Amino acid sequence: QDLDRQVNQSRFMVMSDDLRAMRRVLRRLEFVDKDGVVLLKGRMACELTSADEVLLTEVVFQNIFADMEANHIIALCSCLVFDEKSEDPITSNVELIRGFEAIKGIARTVGEVMVESKLPLDVEEYVNKVKPQLMDVVLGWLEGR
C-alpha cells in the first residue's frame, strides 16, 4: 500500500509538472491571460478536435489562409490531420507549398515555446508531424479530378 501511494504521488507530480508547463505555453502564446482567463485564441482551440489545437489556432491567427481559395485552404488543412508514413511526392502547387512552409515555420515556433516552457518535446519531431502528402489528393477531389 505504501508503494502504491508513492507511485500515485509520483504520477500526480509528473502530471502536475506537465500541466504547469502547458499553462506556460498557453500564456506565452496568448491563449490565456496571466490570471488564467481563456482568451479568444483559447476559445477557438477549445472547439477543435481533429488536429493539434494549438498549432491550428496559431495558423488561423497568423492569417495563413488570408489570400487563399477555399479549395487550397481545405487541401492545406489536410497536412494537419494526415499522420501516416508516406513517401509520396509533395505537391507542385506553389500556393500550397508556400502555405505548407508557413505552417512548418509556425509549428517550429510552437514547438520551441513548448520546449522553453519545459514540456518534453522534440521540436523536429513536432514539425515533422505536418505532412504534405495528402494535399494534392484532397485538392484533386475538391476540383472533381
Image (cartoon, rainbow, N blue to C red):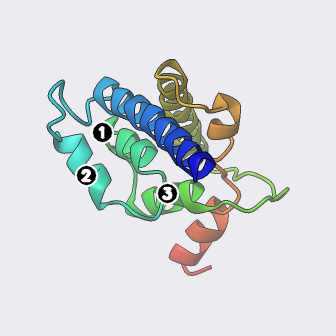
Q: Dot 1 surroundings within 10 Å: few (below 14), some, or many (20 or more)?
A: some
Q: Mark 2–mark 1 contact, CB under 8 Å?
A: yes
Residue 39 in the image: x percent, y percent? 16, 39
Q: Quadrant of residue 112?
A: top right
Relative to 57, 89 lies left or right: right
Identify the residue under disc 1.
Answer: 61
- 138, 79: nearer the viewer: 79
Residue denoted by label 2: 44
Residue at 46 percent across and 31 percent down: it is 17
Label 3 packing within 10 angstroms: few (<14), some (14-19), many (20+): many
Q: Amino acid at mark 3?
A: Cys
Q: Outermost residue, front direction? A: 1
Query: What kind of residue is marked 2?
Result: Met
Number of residue marks:
3
Q: Nearer the viewer, residue 24 or 5?
A: 5
Name the residue beneath numbered marker 3.
Answer: 77
Which is in the foreground here, disc 2 or disc 1?
A: 2
**Image height check: is 85 above or below 139?**
above
The image's mark for residue 129 is none
- In the image, residue 34 above or below residue 135: above
Q: Secondary structure beneath disc 1? A: helix
Q: Position of residue 90 (x, y in %)?
A: 74, 51
Q: Is residue 1 above or below residue 27?
A: below
Spot occupied by residue 56 in the image (x, y as percentages of width and height): 42, 48
> How far apart are the two marked residues, 3 and 1, measured between alpha carbons?
14 Å
Secondary structure at numbered mark 2: helix
Residue density around tag 2, few if under 14, some if 14–19, many if 20 or more, within 10 Å: some
Q: Amino acid at mark 1?
A: Phe
Q: CA distance from mark 2 to mark 1?
A: 10 Å
Q: Residue at x 38, y 31 (%)?
A: 20
33 vs 46: above or below: above
Q: Earlier in the sequence, mark 2 or mark 1?
A: 2
